[in-house]
Image (cartoon, rainbow, N blue to C red):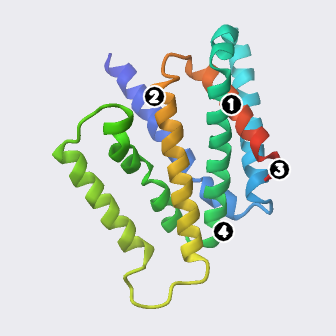
Amino acid sequence: MKSVEMQSKLKLIASLCIFGTISLFVRNIALGSGMIALSRGVLGSIFLLLYLALRRQKLDLPAVRNNLWILLLSGGVMGLNWALLFEAYRYTSIAVATLCYYTAPVMLILASPLVFREQFTWRQLVCVALAACGMVLVSGVLDGGTLPDGTLTGIALAIGSAVLYASITAVNRKTLSRMDAYDKTIVQLGAAGLVTVSY
């Protein structure tokens, strides 16, 4: 049991480390944000399909058909989410854009009474307040000087991306929680790629 828990923790740490490097690649790739998001969606979908093939596991087509419209919609939102975040990296620092993006869990907590019928706890409210204070402090809006050109645009893009990310998370939890994670992700990644074709 402990080895399974340890493997799960290591996988989580590895995924967070990989996700944390995205900004470095985006800043150094000479492509538009939409093209990067398109590539990410298409390549991710293909990789997962190959992974399922190696495991001799097939897509649950009936489940995909039953949830197709919500999968396509949430996948499209995911693609726009990436495009906004990648564009934010071009306007402001990685630290500011990432911190603004990570307000998505705060947004979910604030929306939880309406979306999930959950009650606030004092711990959640304290976390929300601390996250909001941290975002304000790191953004530099209280420094008293003039913000570098594009900073406010970058902050707005990153917060917009966070709103979309929170929406996807809410949809996955409320509507798509019973679907297999691979089936859901493959379709959403494909939809994300399609949406960003014209970005």
Percent position (x, y) of residue 182? 61, 22
Total numbered circles? 4
Q: Is residue 75 left or right of residue 20?
A: right
Give the mark, 4 or 2, whose residue is nearer the N terminus: 4
Q: Looking at the picture, does residue 164 appear above or below residue 28?
A: above
Q: Secondary structure at mark 1?
A: helix
Q: Nearer the viewer, residue 163 or 89?
A: 163
Q: Secondary structure at mark 3?
A: helix
Disc 2/disc 3 C-alpha distance (Å): 29 Å
Percent position (x, y) of residue 31? 80, 59
Which residue is label 2 attached to? 173
Percent position (x, y) of residue 70? 62, 27
Quadrant in which residue 126 is drawn: bottom left
Give the mark, 1 or 3, whose residue is nearer the N terminus: 1
Badge 4: few (under 14), some or many (20 or more) residues near its Cα, within 10 Å? some
Q: Looking at the picture, does residue 53 appear above or below residue 11?
A: above
CB under 8 Å between discs 4 and 2: no
State which quarter of the image contains the N terminus. Answer: top left
Amino acid type indicated by mark 3: Ser
Disc 1/disc 4 C-alpha distance (Å): 28 Å
Give the mark, 1 or 4, whose residue is nearer the N terminus: 1
CB under 8 Å between discs 1 and 3: no
Percent position (x, y) of residue 177? 48, 21
Amino acid type indicated by mark 4: Arg
Q: Mark 4 or 2, which is nearer the eye?
A: 2
Which residue is label 1 attached to? 72
